[in-house]
Image (tube, rainbow, N blue to C red):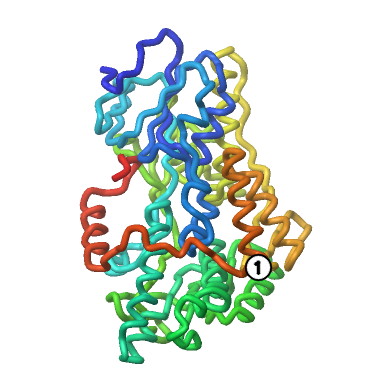
Amino acid sequence: MNSLNVPETNIPRLVVVGGGFAGINLVKKLKNKPFQVVMLDKHNYHTFQPLLYQVATAGLEPDSIAHPIRHIFRKYKNFYFRMALAERIDAENNTLHTNIGPIEYDHLIIATGSSTNYFGNSDIEAQSVPMKSVPEALNLRSLMLQSFESASLTDDLRERERLMTFVIVGAGPTGVELAGSLAELKTHVLPNDYPDLDFRRMSIHLVEAAPKVLPPMSEEASENAAKYLDKLGVHLWLDTMVEDYDGETVKTNKKNLGASTLIWAAGVKGTIVEGTNKEGAVDKSRYVVNTFNQVKGYENIYALGDVAAMISEENPKGHPMLAQVAIQQGENLARNLENWRRKKEAVPFSYKDLGTMATIGRNKAVADLGKVKFGGFIGWLLWMGVHLISLVGFRNRLVVLLNWVINYFSYDKKIRLIIRPVQRKNFRQSKALELEKGEEAVKPAP
């Protein structure tokens, strides 16, 4: 049954689906413990998603925010990595079916994270640009730069304005950070690259259905972020719903915006693996779990991070889909797996909120750390420090720090490369094929 070429073992086998924050931190806590750990992921690297927007806006190369999974766990005994797609769970036989064969498990940990949520709008899904992975961030970088190349070739002012208009949907941390980074490109970088373009015609629109930016954060953080964005020239559209997009015009409940690029950062949904068929196991694209992260109805199947909904009176919709939740749940489950092995009592998960932060460009950031609020330059330094520490690997930390220092003093982002041009028609066709096949769980990199 073990077609993944994993050795037979007489110790408990843990199959971990997903090499994100939850999966990585779970395995780290089980270093050289008496478990055989098999990790599956669609890529052979772990991605530090909070900095994806800097890859998309030419601030960082992708390999500075990604780290090979095999290298992370190179000194771990009984650890095996396979790049594969998890297709279906056969819970009765404790078997996970994958695109490279079935594998039996003693414990199955689903840490597949989340995918972009378009809330059922297929037109937007087909036409817009998501940013949940390194390939998607590179697509956005290419499309952005290609838009300016095309704008420099047309004499049609209306078409030029459309090519130089970017609409970002969703004013959470990703949307706010992306808008701020694009605004800095507009002010400091792109006019030098394209002196024949009038960048007063470039528009950045940030659209949010809620009445404020950064809805989960404090009023103070939201107001400061809105103020910073306004100073950068970003057009804010609050209480605004995007209704449709045909590739040329963004239709909202307030105004239609002509734009060649719509970036969708408005929501995410859990990535479910088929097979958990017991009643109540899945709710709204997330696994319903107890305080030990066990999926409802199953003793040896667990869900972590974005894909898990631990519902309680305090959190009626489950915990927020944040990296810190995934990290803490992964670490707690690792301790409980060891407790169960030793016949000790398990410890229920209790989330420790370490705060939320977002940056809005150079010297501008907001941070909610409990009752303490930071903004401006201090918040920006704090944001940089936290993200540097959280990166995996010394090389990645050093490369990112050097890039930030160079960019800060030179007012430049030198990675404005169209390495793999993206044809919009082909891009949309490839997305349509992905939609047919589905993006559940994990799949091999192209």
81 or 150, which is in the foreground?
150
Q: Amino acid at mark 1?
A: Arg
- On screen, residue 388 above or below 406: above
Residue 289 horizontal/vertical position (percent): 48, 37
| Residue depicted at 41% across the width and 63% down the height | 141
What is the quadrant of residue 357 in the picture? Answer: bottom right
On the question of residue 238 being in view, the answer is no
Q: Secondary structure at mark 1?
A: loop
According to the picture, the residue beneath numbered tag 1 turns out to be 362
Residue 131 horizontal/vertical position (percent): 42, 58
Residue 110 horizontal/vertical position (percent): 42, 35
32 or 103, which is in the foreground?
32
On the rendered image, what quadrant is the N terminus found in?
top left
On the question of residue 247 being in view, the answer is yes
16 or 217, which is in the foreground?
16
Q: In the picture provided, is 367 more to the left or to the right than 161? A: right
On the rendered image, what quadrant is the C terminus found in?
top left
Q: In the picture provided, is 142 more to the left or to the right than 2? A: right
- On screen, residue 186 above or below 95: below
| Residue depicted at 45% across the width and 15% down the height | 12
Question: Furthest residue to the top?
Answer: 10
What is the quadrant of residue 441 in the picture? Answer: top left
| Residue depicted at 29% across the width and 75% down the height | 247
- On screen, residue 227 above or below 413: below
Q: In the picture provided, is 23 more to the left or to the right than 244? A: right
